[in-house]
Image (cartoon, rainbow, N blue to C red):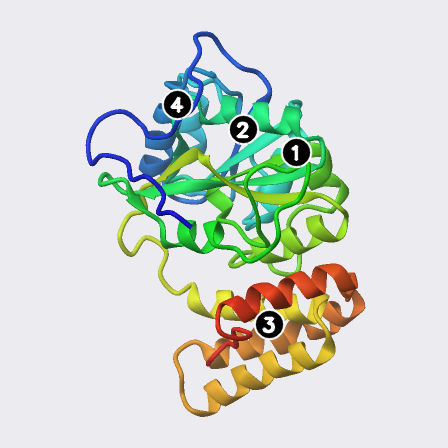
Amino acid sequence: MAELPRTPAAGPAAGPHRVSPGPDGRTTVAIITRDRRESLLRTLDHLAGLPERPPVVVVDNGSTDGTAEAVRDHRAGVRLLCPGRNTGALGRNLAVRSADTPYVAFSDDDSWWAAGALRTAADLFDAHPHLGLLAARTLVGPEYAEDPLNDALATSPLPRRTGLPGTPVLGFLACSAVVRRTAFLDTGGYHSLLFFGAEETLLAYDLAASGWGVAYEPSVTSHHCPDPGARPGRAPALLRNEVLTQWLRRPLPVALGGTAGLLSGALRGRPGAAAALRGVLGRLPRALGQRRPLPPHVERAVRLVEQSRHGPRQAWS
């Protein structure tokens, strides 16, 4: 596949989006945040400047740095939800339920959408009624560097489907995705067992299992400007949730193999492996109680993706 066109290192936001004057009320932007006030305000400034003028919902996961007060005073006119605790990725579920638009775009407190991107995404959803989730092209930092995930999604081995735009995929970046609100809610949204970290894969599986299309479309662009070292210590949660996803949806040999990989890593003293293994074992009874293996056609698609990346990805391969 030809390389995606790169965005210049300076100038306006990238992407062949149809930028039209006037607001577009089809898409709500949902953000979860915790103790990242200044980064969030920067994101809200960018969103407030979009030609679409999207409604914005912010879920404050128990911040103690004055985030809630700053959001209430922001010119974007944000709808603020304060659950009073850290809900992790489940805060996105709260935001989607509170939205009253047919589509919801996710941003993190350090990411935002390019001008015209939300209008382009909404047009694609309007034109493709079986599309459940659209994964966008992500540009990182002030240099507009391509996120490595862009290439992985663009080269997905899954066959193209009639009635869907872009490339079919079974993964996405949470801060660069747009969902059809009904599809998200009908499949349950983000799973409560995972809380936070690598939670996207399970949602992609569940959407595909319910018959919804999940597609990567590089004509829709988001910007991600993470602060260096802003979220340390996430590796154990990522590894834990990868294996929990296997227990929740994959065949037992896959789940057993993932758990064995964590055990092997823990015995060899690999950083994060022991914590991840404890997290898996502590949640395993609930995972077994909520286990719902993927339909055969989705499991075959998952295996095809794994094989294209040189075999199933184990926790400590």
Q: Name the residue beneath numbered marker 4.
A: 115
Q: Name the residue furthest front.
A: 1
Q: Name the residue furthest bottom.
A: 267
Q: Count the marks.
A: 4
The kind of secondary structure element at disc 2 is helix
| First in sequence: mark 4 vs mark 1 | 4
The kind of secondary structure element at disc 3 is helix
On screen, residue 238 versus residue 124, left or right, reads: left
User: Label 1 crowding class (10 Å Cα cut-off): few <14, some 14-19, many 20+?
Assistant: many
Q: Name the residue beneath numbered marker 2.
A: 121
Q: Is residue 89 visible?
A: yes
| First in sequence: mark 1 vs mark 3 | 1
Q: Name the residue beneath numbered marker 3.
A: 243
Q: Nearer the observer, disc 2 or disc 3?
A: 2
Q: Nearer the observer, disc 1 or disc 3?
A: 1
How far apart marks 1 and 3 lie (CA) works out to 27 Å
Image location of residue 168, percent across then percent down = 59, 48
On screen, residue 217 versus residue 291, left or right, reads: left
Going 65% across and 25% down the picture, which residue do you hit? 127
